Image (tube, rainbow, N blue to C red):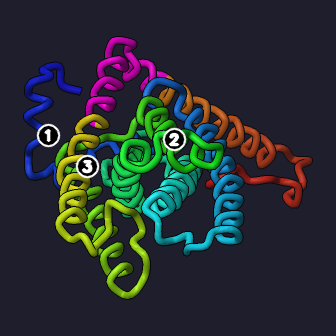
Amino acid sequence: MPGDSRSDFREQFRLAKLGLHHPEPHHFIIPQCLKPKAYILWVVAWALFYVSTLSLEVYYNTREARRPYFIFLTNWSYILQAIVVFLDAGVTIYTHTQRKDIRNGECKTTTWYMRLLWVLFNVSNTVSVIVTLAYHVLLDPTFGYNSIYTHLLNSVYTILTLLFCAKPVHLLHVYQPIIYSVIYIIFSSIYHVTGNEPIYNVLNWDKTGTAVMYSCLIAFVGVPIVHVAIFAIYTLRLFVSVKMNCIGMQKKLMDDDIHSEVTSRNIALDLYKEQEQSPSSNSSNIVKPEGK
């Protein structure tokens, strides 16, 4: 990572940063400062948690609610975050087991599934915080039991993951959560004008001026501000990792893992050769080492 923070910041405004290429794709499947395999435990734990909470959330809300579950921004964003959690677990486990060239830092190509994860990660992070702030500022300042899961835990997960993982955050990727917000605003207007109640009072399209004002504030003011705050958390994580020499420590841990795998493979190869050279060996009992 470059040492000049000002040049690092200017780098964020290069047009290339609009895209989805990252020169170190293994950063998507490791923690910032711990042993790479520790990230597997992290994503699996969260995936199991979201399987249980999302299932209960959808079941009870669809059974008891008088309005469709899938019309609310809260539920859109909660489901999106669950998808990110499941995809993160899948990509991490697959890459650690099947794409060791990426895991070991040898591959410099960002795969399509990592690009997809990156986009959803960016959108979910910003929108989760927006949902927490908008709900408790504009709609309900209290914290009910059910609200904790859908209006608070989402932001807690976002912040913890931003601090723990090594995934990058680009300032210019702000367009991704903005597009998501605009899509929901369009959906809310279509839902209302086709004969349904307004989803939220602030998006009451019978009061077009008020609805447009809140829509613009959320999509074009709130979203960029929150995205900048998320970038600040990412920058803080990088700063702390440099101070703790996490980069050097991670390289050593990765080298140790590679050395351990090579040693195990060489031992298996030596045993195989000894069995072949032994006159009393039974060819039917010879077990070839993996990959040979």
- Upstream in sequence: badge 1 or badge 2: 1
Query: Within 10 Å of the Cα at label 2, are there few (<14), some (14-19), or many (20+) other Cα atoms?
Result: some
Part of the protein shown in magenta: 231-252
Q: Amino acid at mark 1?
A: Gln
Please state which of residues 175 and 241 is positioned toward the viewer in this rendering.
175
Residue 67, quarter of picture: bottom right
- Upstream in sequence: badge 3 or badge 1: 1
Q: Amino acid at mark 2?
A: Leu
SS for tag 1? loop
Q: Would you name the residue on which mark 3 appears?
A: 223
Residue 175, quarter of picture: bottom left
The reply to whether residue 91 is in sight is: no
Q: Is residue 233 magenta?
A: yes
Q: Amino acid at mark 3?
A: Val
- Describe residue 24's horizontal placement relative to residue 6 as left or right: right
Q: Report the residue at 47% width, 60% height from top.
A: 80
